């Protein structure tokens, strides 16, 4: 009986438990980069988004969801932002949100379904853990950076290719508060 108890304790101590986090949007960002006329890179962001994630103690499993308000696109140029909201690009009236729902995480890559412009495709992000720890207010935080490159044409957004590149870099910087 003692051996069984010790075995059960050893097994329980080897299990990895996941912690749940809510994205702190004040300390997070969703950024995109796209080439312009072969001479420069335009950088933009989405100002309104929400999400959550879970992350296992062993660092090898987890999940994430992110919902982005398409009309919050901001490239620091009002006329361009208006055009990005139009049917030529994001078509925010018909497709008000972009969503990402993970399917698999191995500690280094996060694969899931990205829905953009009404089209859902599998996308894989390279993920790096930035850090984690207690905050001054008694909470616990964890941060990650994730990057990927998509082709916007895969999502039905083909306006002005190649003047504006098809390849679009996406960078997500997330700080989460443990729930």
Image (spheres, grey):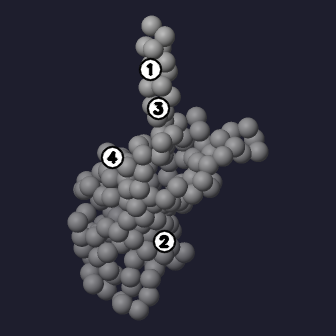
Q: Residue at x 50, y 48 (%)?
A: 50
Q: How many residues crowd around disc 1 within 10 Å: few (fewer than 14), some, or many (20 or more)?
A: few
Q: Is residue 89 left or right of residue 141?
A: left
Element at label 4:
strand
Q: Residue at x 38, y 65 (%)?
A: 148
Say which label, 4 or 3, has the lower sequence index: 3
Quadrant of the rendering where the N terminus is positioned? top left
Whole-percent x, y for residue 149 in the image: 35, 69
Which residue, given by chain and number where applicable, does mark 1 sit on? 7
Most distant residue in the right direction: 136
Q: Are marks 1 and 4 in contact (CB under 8 Å)?
A: no
Element at label 3:
helix
How many marks are shown on the rendered structure? 4
Say which label, 4 or 2, has the lower sequence index: 2
Report the front residue among 89 and 6: 6
Element at label 2:
strand
Q: How many residues crowd around disc 3 within 10 Å: few (fewer than 14), some, or many (20 or more)?
A: few
Whole-percent x, y for residue 151 in the image: 28, 70
Q: Is residue 69 above or below residue 65?
A: below
Q: CA distance from mark 4 to mark 2?
A: 27 Å
Q: CA distance from mark 1 to mark 4?
A: 30 Å
Say which label, 3 or 1, has the lower sequence index: 1
Report the front residue among 156 and 136: 136
Say which label, 2 or 1, has the lower sequence index: 1
Report the front residue among 93 and 32: 32
Which residue, given by chain and number where applicable, does mark 3 sit on? 14
Q: CA distance from mark 3 to mark 2?
A: 43 Å
> Disc 3 vs disc 2: which is toward the camera?
3
Q: How many residues crowd around disc 4 within 10 Å: few (fewer than 14), some, or many (20 or more)?
A: some
Say which label, 1 or 4, has the lower sequence index: 1
Which residue, given by chain and number where applicable, does mark 4 sit on? 104
Whole-percent x, y for residue 47 in the image: 53, 60
């Amino acid at each position: 009986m003692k051996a069984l108890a010790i075995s059960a304790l050893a097994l329980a101590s080897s299990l990895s438990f996941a912690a749940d986090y809510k994205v702190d949007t004040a300390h997070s960002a969703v950024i995109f980069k796209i080439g312009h006329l072969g001479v420069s890179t335009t950088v933009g962001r989405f100002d309104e988004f929400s999400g959550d994630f879970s992350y296992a103690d062993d660092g090898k499993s987890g999940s994430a969801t992110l919902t982005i308000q398409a009309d919050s696109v901001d490239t620091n140029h009002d006329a361009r932002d208006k055009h990005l909201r139009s049917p030529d690009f994001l078509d925010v009236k018909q497709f008000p949100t972009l969503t990402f729902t993970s399917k698999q995480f191995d500690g280094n890559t996060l694969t899931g379904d990205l829905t953009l412009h009404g089209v859902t495709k599998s996308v894989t992000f390279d993920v790096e853990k930035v850090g984690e720890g207690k905050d001054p207010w008694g909470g616990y935080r964890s941060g990650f950076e994730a990057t990927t490159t998509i082709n916007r044409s895969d999502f039905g957004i083909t306006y002005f290719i190649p003047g504006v590149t098809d390849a679009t870099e996406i960078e997500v910087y997330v700080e989460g508060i443990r729930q």
